[in-house]
Image (cartoon, rainbow, N blue to C red):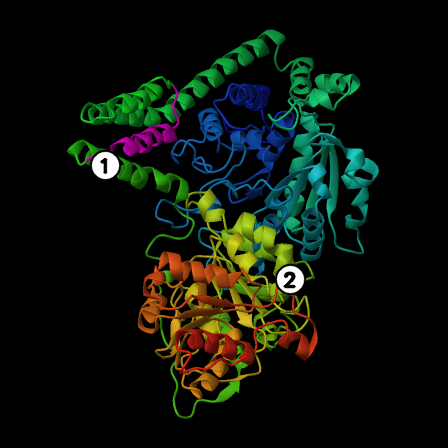
Amino acid sequence: MQTEANTNKDLSFDDFKTEVLNDYKVAVTSRECSLLGRREVLTGKAKFGIFGDGKEVPQLAMAKAFKNGDFRSGYYRDQTFMMAIGQLTIQQFFAGLYANTDLSQEPMSAGRQMGGHFATHSLDANGNWNNLTQQKNSSSDISPTAGQMPRLLGLAQASKIYRNVKGIDTTNFSVEGNEVAWGTIGNASTSEGLFFETINAAGVLQVPMVISVWDDEYGISVHARHQTTKENISEILKGFQRDKNANGYEILRVKGWDYANLIATYEEASKIAREEHVPVLIHVNELTQPQGHSTSGSHERYKDKARLNWEAQNDCNVKMRTWLIDNNIATDEELQTIEKNIKKQVRDAKKAAWTNYLEPALAEKNEIVSLLQTVANSSPNKVFIEKIVNELEDSKEPNRKDAVQAARKALRYVISENTSEKQQLLDWIDAFFEKVQPLYSSDLYNDSESAAIHVKEVKPTYTDDNETVDGRVVLRENFDYIFNNYPETLVFGEDAGNIGDVNQGLEGLQEKYGELRVADAGIREATILGQGIGMAMRGLRPIAEIQYLDYIMYALQIISDDLATLRYRTKGRQKAPLIIRTRGHRLEGIWHSGSQMGGVLNLVRGIHVLVPRDMTKAAGFYNTLLQSDEPALVVECLNGYRLKEQLPSNIGEFKTPIGVVETVKEGEDITLVSYGSTLRIVQQAAKELAEVGINAEIIDVQSLLPFDLNHDIVKSVQKTNRLMVIDEDVPGGASAYILDQVLNKQEAFKFLDSQPKTLAAKPHRPAYGTDGDYFSKPSVEDVFEAIYDVMHEASPSTYPKLR
């Protein structure tokens, strides 16, 4: 089904006719998939449908300009493009609609995303990079509108880095930076802030990026007059047009039904972006959406008769069909034959996809029906079990849950029995979940031996003459080692370049390694993250710096929806090993206090969250992460850059283990668990507690995601029989997460002689100033008194009431 541009200028008419008719076949095929797909949803075979009808012809033109090595970052209406580049078959389209969990049949996400979300495989089955320069690439789509835009920026910037930075091994990733990143977005979604942030950043960076705006005048049911100033996105972006005096964009406009001009426009855009590394915006207007926004409603509810008539007449497929006849490329009869054949192809492929989807569910249904009949025959509750069997047998098109649901319900009727048949039922249920659950839950993290959790600890080494320096110097020297030994690494962020970051952890490194590898960025956190995601998806090892943890809120949607889900939503066939560097804790004021950890933990499952207590530990985390291929957030202690640390002798080589806690003080009376800057508060309190005879054990969490993989905290609780978690997040935030891990996952409740406690900050954000900090977050006195109170409850005579 793939459509390729023929660059032969002496193309014969017969060859031209063949190529154009092939394009029309792709457009008609895509449209038939949309029409039949909607019916499949309305009959209940699929859960939801959102389709690319009305956008077929411009996507054909985009596909012709799209080369091997290029990347797409699009949205959920690009099915025609994916078919045209040979990365989506009819059967795969329907496999996605039905949520087939077999990656060989549904290669986009193995049923983890709804239909219309597309991807290609950047990795092989073993997690190794494919040669991206020899294939057409699509980064994995996400649903949030405009959420694809930040990633697009990074995919384009990778070409700039590969073209201009020497020493990088470009094998598998780039051919002299000639690759273009192609973005697609609906006209209404250009109202999102992420769109405008990306537009501005790409204009500043001058990267090879082509953005197509599919304009059908509506966003769901809302007309463009409510969406866009002047109802025209290219009109209001005129100020971005480049000229002889200033860099900017090339802005092109073309009608979405004009096949010939579309091809010329996309060829021009490709040439500009590919050769000049200039971003291009193509405003494709006069498009239609024949079936409305999605299967959730009908567009007849919000479009008047005049608009519906206009859409019928100006449908891009209809216009292309008329153009073919008017230019004597095909007759009406020839096109009718093509269309009839395609209808049959689509129906047949849909039927095959449905058969393949049902096959495992039917097999499992037959298995459990047979087993349950055996169980019923041996049980006093036979009549009840047979009712379950009959209901299951009546299901002609079962889901996979139906079989195990029946098995689990039947198990209740044999709960008091002790038979071999019951054991077979138990074994079947266990085997079912062992086989099926991974189809829905695998690949959230790297599960292979190359995972970061398998990188062995290498301790920092010291000699008698090791220099004592500010903590920031440890970081600076370690980053110097990283950039010198890993040419594919780069760092960028607000103040990261010229001044070497606000805390001087990158001091002097821009001058040494250049402005492309140690770079300043604008105040635009979401696209800083997008730069990192896109470049990491193309084989680079970026470090995206967010100045403070508080500001990560601007980028949290991108981290949560895009970065954290990438490996999962592609079932391990794409990755973005981005390192996010930030700093937080213990500054002063509502927006410089780093108190969002609980929210972060709950929204970024899929990346590592690391909370080093000092800069040596932080540097060790960076070294560990570069030995693996997983994304991570590293939160440095904001008040630790000027604290003194010894400079290790093995800079760049020591590694802090991920998912491993550290006992920083041994004791036998109570286990204290904390991390980051708060740990210093706890350590001071422990010294003062020792003066009244309380010997506390202190454990530094170090890594919140993953958390204490060796279950060392429960071993401590088993010794002390008491537990307190101290954290500067709000109550119910990170402290509640830690307590859940220790009590429920590690089952520490078995060893407790006292109620487990948490000590967190106040529910509000920290107030400004030294006193604001003292009265907002746990102080040494708070920690002392909270621990003393636990010991008083345990032994009132030994520890009389304090207050």
Give the residue pinned by disc 2: 551
Residue 618 is situated, as x and y percent measured from the top left of the image, at 48, 72
Q: Nearer the viewer, residue 34 or 263?
A: 34
User: Which residue in the rendered view is the most extreme toward the right?
Assistant: 230
393 lies above or below 584: above
Residue 532, x across and y down, in percent: 56, 57
Along the line of sight, the residue nearer the viewer: 546 or 776: 776
Query: Measured from the top left, where is residue 475 in percent x and y?
Result: 52, 76
Q: Is residue 322 above or below residue 241?
A: above
> Between residues 82 and 164, which one lies in front from this camera angle?
82
Q: Which residue is mark 1?
A: 416
Task: Give the Cα separation between the discs numbered 2 and 1.
Answer: 57 Å
Instruction: Give percent across and percent down for residue 368.
Output: 27, 27
Dominant secondary-structure state across the stretch colored magenta:
helix
Which residues make up the magenta segment?
397-417
Instruction: Give the residue type that dot 2 points to.
Output: Tyr
Q: Quadrant of the C terminus?
A: bottom right
